[in-house]
């Protein structure tokens, strides 16, 4: 069991595509917090479209800096069950960030949303990112803690709970994205301009919605 917990800690703090190629240690909780902090800047300084765009570029920058980490972590195989649960939790938070960065970036170029609506959408994403990030911090604390008040089963139970909750937020972000894109599509359809939405986001069969 101690071996399992060692692997769990290793997954959340580092990633290696093979035994021969080691990847630089990265803290996924800090990475997620960096994306969240940049996202919060959009909410706090969203008085103009230029401010929203400027701050979103910072979000993209932080996410791109961490994308290699998520890609390397995705390539890690042959983990024990519980370590894989931790890996998948981290990757879900990474996917939440990716959905936000990719889709909100497109929404900034969507004429069907007003500046006020973009600020509101950013606020929604920020809230969902915040909850996911807090869960990731909790996971980090559990797998790296030396607190003897928790036995192995209790730790594993918490890991399972955090995984399930992060998965729910992942689904919420996907749903939130779908609904916002659908609003744009309906508005474009009324203007006989649905083609523009499809060119921006892709067709319903190609994308999340």
Image (tube, rainbow, N blue to C red):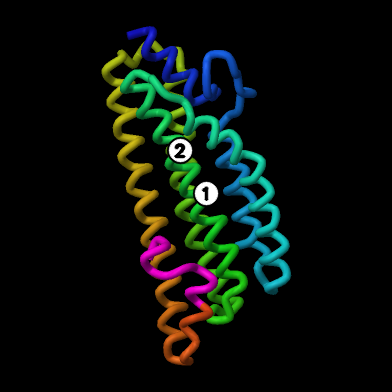
Q: As drawn, is 102 to the left or to the right of 145?
A: right
Among numbered discs 1 and 2, the one appearing first in the sequence: 2
Number of the label disc, if any, that sits on residue 182: none
Question: What is the secondary structure assignment of the residue under circle 2?
Answer: helix
Tell me how far mark 1 sits from mark 2, CA to CA: 10 Å
- Nearer to us in this view, 107 or 77: 77
Give the residue pinned by disc 2: 91
Give the residue pinned by disc 1: 97
- Nearer to us in this view, 118 or 87: 87
- Nearer to us in this view, 82 or 73: 73
* Vertical position of residue 15 compared to residue 47: above or below: above
* Vertical position of residue 203 compared to residue 15: above or below: below
The verdict on residue 158 being magenta is: no
Q: Tell me which residue sits at (42%, 70%) in the image.
A: 203
> Residue 147 location in percent, x, y?
42, 14
Q: Tell me which residue sits at (56%, 69%) in the image.
A: 107
Residue 179, by quadrant, is bottom left
> Residue 52 location in percent, x, y?
67, 66
Mark 1 Cα-neighbour bin, 10 Å: few <14, some 14–19, many ≥20: many
Q: Which residues are magenta?
A: 197-209
Q: Tell me which residue sits at (65%, 68%) in the image.
A: 46
């Amino acid at each position: 069991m101690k071996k399992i917990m060692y692997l769990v800690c290793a997954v959340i703090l580092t990633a290696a595509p093979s035994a021969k190629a080691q990847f630089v240690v990265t803290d996924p909780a800090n990475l997620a917090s960096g994306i969240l902090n940049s996202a919060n800047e959009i909410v706090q300084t969203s008085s103009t479209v230029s401010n929203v765009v400027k701050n979103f570029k910072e979000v993209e920058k932080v996410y791109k800096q961490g994308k290699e980490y998520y890609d390397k972590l995705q390539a890690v195989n042959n983990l024990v069950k519980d370590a894989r649960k931790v890996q998948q939790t981290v990757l879900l938070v990474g996917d939440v960030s990716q959905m936000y960065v990719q889709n909100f970036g497109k929404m900034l170029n969507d004429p069907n949303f007003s500046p006020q609506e973009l600020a509101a959408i950013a606020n929604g994403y920020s809230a969902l990112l915040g909850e996911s990030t807090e869960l990731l911090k909790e996971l980090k604390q559990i797998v790296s803690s030396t607190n003897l008040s928790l036995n192995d089963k209790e730790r594993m139970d918490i890991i399972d709970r955090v995984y399930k909750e992060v998965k729910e937020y992942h689904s919420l972000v996907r749903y939130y994205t779908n609904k916002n894109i659908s609003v744009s599509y309906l508005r474009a359809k009324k203007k006989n301009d649905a083609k523009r939405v499809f060119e921006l986001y892709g067709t319903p069969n190609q994308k999340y919605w």
